[in-house]
């Protein structure tokens, strides 16, 4: 965990936690690429009876996908990071290895937090998704019909270690921001460890 500077950080803004996708998520993405590469090599090698060049092409193409895929996954994984501060949540998400999208929500804009695992295996590993719901997500477009329009202003944090505890921590930030903002300045940073071992 790091609590240092991030691009666009405001004066006196204190970082409470740096959220990065768990390493297991990167391993899963890499495994998918390697499986695809192996399948391509095997399939094209089976077609080598038609032309010996196909087998060679299969190896080159398969290994190329593995190498380029490894670089892409590593580059983008390390660019994905979010920061919880005493004022807001800021997420940097890699669109490409060379471009990063930035989204932010102040605590005034956040209405609730939702957490869930992708599957039972991620749940056992205590890795899940934290969704920070913005008040602007649903907009009333007509008072009489009460029609809602989804604006997709929510901020998702994927593959978060101790996702449930982080969701509770964000709930605590929201409560303190609303009821005791002065105490929020003294709030300890989040530590992704079992309860009782965090401080």
Image (cartoon, rainbow, N blue to C red):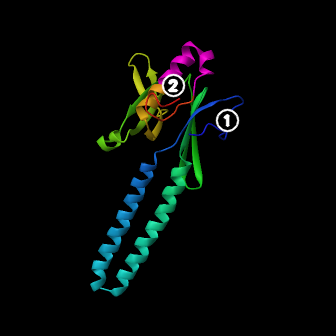
Looking at the rendered structure, the secondary structure element under dot 1 is: loop
Q: Earlier in the sequence, mark 1 or mark 2?
A: 1
Q: Secondary structure at mark 2?
A: strand
Q: Quadrant of the N terminus?
A: top right
Say few, some or many: other residues with alpha carbon within 10 Å of mark 2 (under 14 / 14 to 19 / 20 or more): many
For mark 2, what is the residue? 110
Residue farthest along the top direction in this orientation: 179
Relative to 79, does residue 157 appear above or below in the rendering?
Answer: above
> Circle 1 sits on which residue?
9
Which residue is at a point 47% across and 23% down the rendered structure image? 171
Magenta region, residue range:
171-188
Residue 173: within the magenta?
A: yes
Q: Position of residue 154 (x, y in %)?
A: 47, 32
Locate residue 10 relative to residue 154 in the image: left or right: right
Which residue is at the front of the view, 6 or 44? 6
Residue 32 falls in image quadrant: bottom left
SS assignment for the magenta stretch, majority: helix
Q: Classify mark 1: residues with Cα within 10 Å, few (<14), some (14-19) or many (20+).
A: some
Quarter of the image for residue 6 reads top right
Classify 1 as above or below 43.
above
Query: Is residue 83 shown to the viewer in this render?
Result: yes
């Amino acid at each position: 965990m790091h609590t240092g500077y991030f691009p666009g950080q405001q004066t006196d803004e204190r970082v409470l936690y740096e959220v990065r996708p768990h390493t297991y998520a990167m391993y899963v993405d890499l495994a998918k690429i390697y499986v695809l590469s192996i399948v391509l090599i095997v399939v094209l090698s089976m077609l080598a009876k038609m032309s010996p060049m196909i087998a060679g092409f299969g190896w080159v193409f398969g290994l190329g996908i593995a190498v380029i895929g490894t670089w892409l996954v590593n580059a983008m994984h390390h660019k994905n990071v979010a920061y919880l501060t005493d004022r807001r949540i800021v997420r940097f998400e890699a669109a490409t290895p060379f471009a990063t999208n930035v989204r932010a929500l102040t605590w005034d804009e956040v209405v609730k937090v939702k957490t869930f695992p992708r599957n039972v295996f991620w749940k056992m590993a205590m890795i899940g998704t934290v969704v920070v719901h913005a008040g602007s997500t649903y907009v009333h477009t007509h008072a009489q019909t009460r029609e809602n329009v989804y604006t997709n202003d929510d901020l998702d944090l994927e593959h978060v270690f101790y996702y449930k505890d982080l969701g509770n921590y964000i709930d605590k930030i929201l409560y303190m921001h609303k009821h005791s903002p002065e105490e929020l300045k003294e709030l300890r940073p989040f530590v992704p460890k079992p309860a009782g071992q965090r401080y």
